[in-house]
Amino acid sequence: MGAAVLNQPHFQDADKAREYLEALRWSNGVVCPHCGVVDRAYALKGEKHRAGLYKCGDCRKQFTVTVGTVFERSKIALNVWLQAVYLMCASKKGISSLQLKRMLGVTYKTAWFMSHRIREAMTNDPNGLLGAGGGTVEADETYWGNSKRSKIGRKYKGRGGDHKEKIVALVERDGNVRSFHVKAVNGTTLRTILKEHIAEEANLMTDELKLYKPIGKEFASHQTVKHSAKEYARGNAHTNTIEGFFSILKRGLIGTFHHVGKKHLRRYIKEFDFRYNARKMSDVQRANLALVGIGGKRLMYSQPSRR
């Protein structure tokens, strides 16, 4: 998996890794993570100062390129961090913490924590509405985990997904995907997600789930396919794009990670969103994109999971 790429200097040397990260994050000038001022910092040199240490000319605080990022205060060499980022970005179905442990030569606990920090870097705020300008957006839901039925599952007989974790996803054809871990698949949840993320002029495509029918009237058009009758495409009406994404997601969750609990499912989903949305990039470009997003997302061991 990119063995030749991993032989590059910034993957093998911590100082080269720092220089590589500085060039990526500060392409328009050194940015102080404390006050946000651009290009007013200067490097502190001499035997008393470690390489890569800067001081802001405005707030007078010292910092390095890792301050305010998921790498801050880590005892792991920066080049090892960059290797982990590349491996996670280059693996279509993800890479397990156990495999990272073997490849990076770290403990399993370290590999697990590194992977979750990197997933935070892969989480980006949505940019604009899907389907703007009359595009086509597919919406669907899927279920994951919890093979044993809970009390809720027993209460609602016949509804096989009630005891599982619910995932709702939207994908613009030839565009991006946005996925959400939700507590329930109901009209309120679906309407909130669709209205917040899909433009009104978009053409909505769904399956025959009745919950989509009233929501679909709020968009330019709404077409459905009836999977229960083995109808999967009718001209331009289909949900094959989102089904393809769910296929990649589930193959990764089942084949790579095996067990993903409720607490961390959100991060795994966003990891697959990130790779899908950067699918037209090379592995190196995708890794660089993740590195650009490391700022402001420091993850602590004691930090609770957000839903």
Image (cartoon, rainbow, N blue to C red):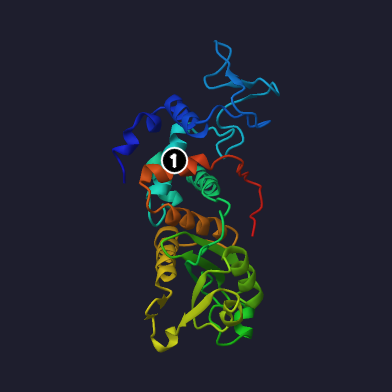
**Image quadrant assignment for residue 197:** bottom right
Which amino acid, by three-letter code, is at mark 1? Asn
* In front of the other: 191 or 229: 191
Left or right of residue 302: residue 273: left
In the image, residue 156 sits, relative to residue 290, either above or below, namely: below
At a point 58% along the width and 87% down the height, the residue shown is 157
Task: Please give the count of numbered marks on the rendered protein.
Answer: 1
Q: Is residue 142 visible?
A: no
In the image, residue 132 sits, relative to residue 37, either above or below, namely: below
In the image, residue 119 sits, relative to residue 10, either above or below, namely: below
Task: Return the residue found at the far right.
Answer: 59
- In this figure, which residue is indicated by the disc labeled 1? 288
At a point 41% along the width and 27% down the height, the residue shown is 13
* Residue 85 image position (x, y, % from top left): 45, 43
In the image, residue 29 sits, relative to residue 117, either above or below, namely: above
* In front of the other: 37 or 143: 37
At a point 32% along the width and 33% down the height, the residue shown is 7
* Residue 137 image position (x, y, % from top left): 49, 68
**Image quadrant assignment for residue 214:** bottom right
Counting other residues with Cα less than 10 Å from the Cα at mark 1, is it few (<14), some (14-19), or many (20 or more)?
some
As helix, strand or loop, the secondary structure at mark 1 comes to helix
Q: Is residue 115 visible?
A: yes
At a point 39% along the width and 33% down the height, the residue shown is 11
* Residue 98 image position (x, y, % from top left): 43, 50
Left or right of residue 18: residue 39: right
* In front of the other: 298 or 205: 205
